[in-house]
Image (cartoon, rainbow, N blue to C red):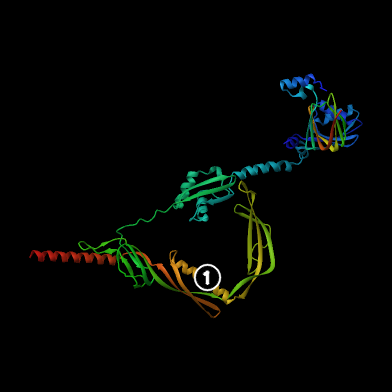
Amino acid sequence: MKQKKGVAMSVAERFDLPYEALARVPRLTVTGGNQAIIENHHGLVEYSGELIEIDGGKMKLSIRGYGLEISSMTKSETVVIGKILSVEFS
Amino acid sequence: MDKYISALRGGARIRITGANTAQVLNRCVESGVDFGKAVASDEFTVDISVKRKDAGKVYIIAERSMCTAQLLRENGIPVQGRRIKKRYVLMIAPVLLIVFMAWSSMHVWDIQVVGNETISDGEILRALSKAGVTTGSYWPSFVSDNIRSRVMVQIPEIRWITVNITGSRATVLVRERVQSPELFKENAGVNIEAEKAGIITDICIYRGQSRIKHGQTVAQGDVLVSGAVDSTFADTRTLHAKADIWARTWYEIVSAAPLSEHRKLSEGSEEKGLSLVFGDKRINFYNNSGKVGENYDKIYSERRLGVEGIFSLPFKLVRTAITEYELVEVQLDANDVADRLKAELLDELSGRIGLDGEIISTAFTHIEKDGIIYVTLRAECHENIAAEREMTQAEFLEIEHLNSEREEESKDDGTDNDG
């Protein structure tokens, strides 16, 4: 079944623009399972050493692992370090 | 880099406790309070690091979120500065250190001489000292031209000299004068004489008149090739004789050595001391800097303080180890001593016959007398015995006399023919 593309994605594809900037969705970069950089976030929902839930606007981003901690957090970017076992979008 | 910036501006570690710590963190970010190293110790507690100036904002945000904020610690230069505000010595010490470093870097504390081959370091350093370049000199006052001219006047063998300064180290670059070769004077009046006695085997004359034959025995000092050359129709003329005369030569060299020697036997007692050398001054941190007993070894090991090759402080740490010993007479094995002497004799022989000489045969004998061993080397060699020697005044006068006699004879012959 053909999935319907959103307007933001169509525009981003047509004009070669960054999708996350147009759609206001979080951008997640995971490096080596030990570091995750979340851009365009809307704040924390829950925070513990095993689970960090981040508000992504249209979705919630859950990072599971152990020894998790927020290395730095600004309005636009959050850096999570620790042993990352899984990342879920809901 | 962030670590150093954070240290410069100062930071605070704050513990937030409450039911909704995540909300506090969100509000901090919304208020422009960036934080880092957020560690949740349990469900209701999280520790964060913020800028020192933002700590007050975090307290307010935590209070509004029904949480409590507690300052755990503060760090960074502003905090340290506040701590040492009343400690004047601690405040002055870094300033004094910086001033001292600046003053020290303007002086020469280490001088290295490079590029010299025949002139000793000591000679150059003494000349430099007279020119104002010595340990502790203020290097910005150095004028290369002045130093160069003053040193070159004292040591004429130096062709060029320059002083390069790197930190507190002065590297003196020296170029020595190349001696001009001696010119070959064609009519100088030089004979070739036998440097050693021997039997002639090969004659190769480039200039001059031969006085020898193949197989002839010659004594040391005999004229082999004369620089006085006869002419049938003119006077006897002088020239610079040149030749290679090869001969069989014989050597007998004796060397002697005692069959016992004194060796140092350590008594086990060793004293160590530390000294600080500042320029020409020396401060000993130990007593009894003089000698310990009759026989003792004093070993110094120096260590210059600073960064190798870049910067050196005007201090030098000197470790002194004083070890007492007893001199014990030890009997040596005669064969070992004889072997050592034989090797020395062969070296001596090689030196005497030169690089182009050849040792044909050798024979050693040795005797022991009064605790001394005598080793004799008898050797037959083949070598160039030609040695140049300028003619003496008597030889020149003889030639002149010969020429005048010949002139008179020729005049008499002319008169007889006329008659």
Q: Is residue B409 visible?
A: yes
Specify the farthest residue to the bottom: B369
Specify the farthest residue to the left: B419
Q: Is residue B195 visible?
A: no
Locate residue A69, reporting x and y percent. 83, 36
**Looking at this view, is B203 or A5 the one in front?**
A5
Locate residue B406, reporting x and y percent. 19, 65
**Looking at this view, is B383 or B79 the one in front?**
B383
Residue linked to disc 1: B343
Which residue is at 57% across, 74% downward?
B336
Which residue is at 34% across, 57% downward?
B184
Specify the farthest residue to the front: A1
Which residue is at 48% across, 44% downward?
B145
Residue B151, relative to residue B354: is it above or below?
Answer: above
Write down the chain letter for disc 1.
B
Q: Quadrant of residue B283?
A: bottom right
Locate residue B403, reporting x and y percent. 21, 64
In the image: residue B56, left or right of residue B3: right
In the image: residue A60, left or right of residue B125: right
Quadrant in the picture for the C terminus of chain B = bottom left
* Residue type at the position of mark 1: Ala
Which residue is at 73% across, 23% downward?
A17
Instruction: Decide: few, some or many residues near mark 1? Use Cα within 10 Å; few <14, some 14-19, many ≥20.
Output: few
In the image: residue B87, left or right of residue B376: right
Q: Quadrant of residue A41?
A: top right
Residue B183, relative to residue B5: is it above or below?
Answer: below
**Looking at this view, is A3 or B131 the one in front?**
A3
Locate residue B99, reporting x and y percent. 65, 42
